[in-house]
Image: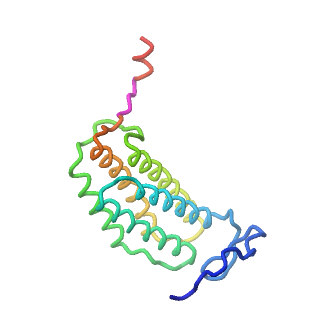
Amino acid sequence: MGYRLTKIYTRTGDDGTTGLSDTSRIDKDSLRIRAIGTIDELNSFIGLICSEDIDDDSRDSLMEIQHRLFDMGGELSMPGHEILSKESVRLLEQKLDKINRDLEPLEDFILPGGCRAAAVCHVARSVCRRAERDVVGLSHSEEVSSVVLGYLNRLSDLLFVLSRCFNKASGHSDIFWQHNRLNSTES
């Protein structure tokens, strides 16, 4: 094993900067650090999903995704370096197709909720969309791999489908948006 953390605090960030993997320092509120931070937040929510009572296959898939998100953060901390491969996006697509095959087609929008695992999955999905927006914002001023953007886009779709899968497995139904709810309750 290479570099080992023996001391957690370094005081080097007390001036509002942080170090990248190439040893350069940038502001902690930069677009790059914002994107890395949102990916870290997403990874934490996926860890929370894994702590729920879910099937082993989903847990294994989510843990693999956590590793890829860590790779993504590493890639973003090394400007110009690519770690994620197109294969990682293809694997998400395969998983998405497999899970979605067993779900009823949607005819309307659904609201976040249902069982706890599904609700947490919806939170992770919304954080994933924010991570995607942060990476897109970064890509307007600096080069970002298209694989990173594709992965985040596919991952948010997978989290949506997993939330439906968790609801189905727990006996909860999806909560359908009632677009005319106000009109029907006022009558």
- For the residue pair 169 and 187, the one nearer the viewer reads as 169
Residue at 54 percent of width and 59 percent of height: 41
Q: Is residue 157 magenta?
A: no
Q: Is 174 left, or right, of 152 in this rendering?
A: left
Q: Is 20 left, or right, of 150 in this rendering?
A: right
Residue at 56 percent of width and 78 percent of height: 78
Residue at 29 percent of width and 49 percent of height: 165
- Which of the 4 image quadrants contains residue 33? bottom right
Percent across and percent down for residue 38 are 55, 60
Say above or below: 112 vs 41.
above
Say above or below: 110 vs 60.
above
Q: Is 187 left, or right, of 135 in this rendering?
A: left
Part of the protein shown in magenta: 176-180
- Which of the 4 image quadrants contains residue 27? bottom right
The tally of labels here is 0
Say above or below: 140 vs 162.
below
Percent across and percent down for residue 54 are 33, 54
